[in-house]
Image (spheres, grey):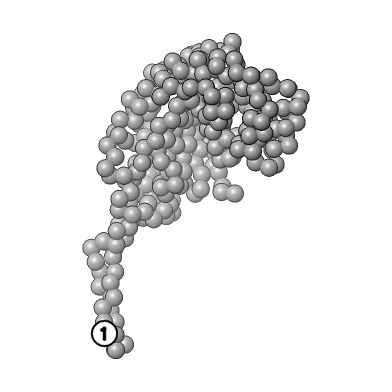
Amino acid sequence: MPSINKFTELENTLFPVLEVPIPGMSLKGKPNESEWEFDCAESSGYKLIINDKTGNIISCMTEDYKLVKNETIINQAIKPIENKGGILLESITTNNDRKSYWKWNFPDIEVPMAGEEMNPTIEIHNSYDGSTEIRILGGTFRLICSNGLMVGTVTSKYRNKHLHTNTQIDNLGSIIESSINSLIATFGPIGEQLADRKLKTKDIAQVAKELFPQRTNDLFISKVLLDKPKTYWDLLNVCTNLLTHHMHRDNQTTRQIESRLLPTLTKLAQVEVPN
């Protein structure tokens, strides 16, 4: 399992990074002679991404890869988030600085959903090894246990590739603001439809198969048998309870399940999700 470093300070994920071109090399010589020599070319087509604070090599990428620094993303994101009253919940780096992840909650904004009041959240993901696109995820939080643990469900998603031809990266601030506004407008109706849909037994098995790893599969079934969900909204509650009490919040698998949970349930319930 990759190591995970969780920080309480946002600044700790904003470590400086450098791009260092890798020079190209070619081999010169005669096939029938033992004399060979290397000739330096201008570029090999690759570059190193380096943590300038520690000197560690983070990744080796092609020249087409556009480095988008965590600092650049946060500088664009922080103003619209603070304007909406956002509070930072998580600031995490994983895989030896290759991936970063941030999550904000908006406690002053309430989204009515199936008779409950929930708060919007925004998650932002970035990577320095091309494994993760720049992702902005909109969701909601519910406080479901006394120790303050929360679980979010994703309602909107935006992705941005690390390419020099991608000009949308410069508009992250407006994209984040649009995601929050869209979330407020769409999440309530989605919840009402989930609460109105009678749960099919075969879909419980489908959720267990698609979302939960083997070690939590039995826990999921036990929780279903105990709570006896009758609607897809009830099943959402079962899943969020399981994610809160039986899975680690710092684990990447938990976040992956969390991001897939609502799309899976809306698909099974045949609930239309606005674009």
**Can you see residue 75?**
yes
User: Is 56 situated left or right of 210 in this image?
Assistant: left
Where 1 falls versus 148 (above or below)? below
Q: Quadrant of residue 46?
A: bottom left
Query: Residue placed at 49% from the left, 49% from the top?
Result: 96
Mark 1, residues whose alpha carbon is within 10 Å: few (<14), some, or many (≥20)? few
Q: Is residue 95 above or below residue 251?
A: below
Instruction: Where is residue 207? Give x, y as percent.
Output: 63, 33
Left or right, 148 with respect to 263, comes to: right
Between 58 and 135, the one lying in front of the other is: 135
Q: Is residue 119 visible?
A: no
Q: Residue at x 44, y 37 (%)?
A: 125
Q: Nearer the viewer, residue 87 or 150?
A: 150
State the residue in front, 240 or 234. 234
The residue that mark 1 highlights is 30
Q: Is 24 on the left or on the right of 12, as rendered?
A: left
The amino acid marked with disc number 1 is Lys
Q: Residue 11, image x and y in percent? A: 43, 35
